[in-house]
Amino acid sequence: MIKDKLLLKNILIYIGLILLVSGKIFIREFDNLDEIWGFNFARCISEGLLPYKDFSIILTPLLPMISGIFLKIFGTELIVFRFLECFEVATILFVIYKILIKLKINKSISLIMTLVIYFAYSDIFTFDYNWAVLLITLLTVYMELKFLKEEFSFKRDFILGMLVRFSNFI
């Protein structure tokens, strides 16, 4: 029963973060060149073009490939990219909140600190590799904190290692 309440509370916090973030992201002008640049890479991949062969790309293509899948499924529109951005930013904020909870900071203070971080960076959040690497790093920190006192587990440590390794391909 307690785990169900905690799960419901976490879901509500995550949905609240998505709504908060989407209120800022969807009204923003289309003037961020990193966003347009990333969208174009994903668009090219969704149309079947190969990175480095059919179009020039400077960064590693994992994030454009992932976002290209979503563009292929939901349509090649910048609004789809903005939806991905909402989920990415909300997930970053939620993981920050969960890390603060793991550090035994009061839940109310953790939520307030998470919101302060959001408002401090809300103008520069975009769906690009920098924020994706931050998300992977935060997930790694959270998992390390979660399993801090447990004994060695090859499977868990292997998954953590692969997660960190994927940050090089984003």
Image (cartoon, grey):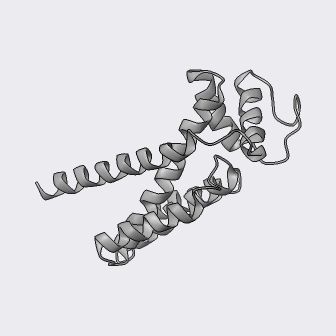
In the rendered image, the vertical position of residue 37 relative to residue 105, given as above or below: above
Q: Residue at the left extreme?
A: 1
Q: Residue at x 62, y 37 (%)?
A: 66
Report whether residue 153 is seen. Answer: no
Q: Is residue 81 left or right of residue 141?
A: right
How far from the left and from the top, in percent, is residue 58?
85, 47
Question: Quadrant of the image for the N terminus?
Answer: bottom left
Q: Is residue 54 visible?
A: yes
Estimate the x, y position of residue 129 in percent, counting from the top left. 69, 51
Q: Quadrant of residue 156?
A: bottom left
Q: Residue at x 70, y 38 (%)?
A: 30
Label tally: 0
Judge whether 51 appears above or below 148 on screen.
above
Query: In the depicted view, which residue is nearer to us: 14 or 169?
Result: 14
In the image, what residue occupies the spot 37% across and 71% down? 110
Q: Position of residue 125 (x, y in %)?
A: 62, 53
- Of residues 74 and 112, which is closer to you in this image? 112
Residue 83 to residue 154: above or below: above
Q: Residue at x 64, y 49 (%)?
A: 126
Q: Which image quadrant for residue 45?
A: top right
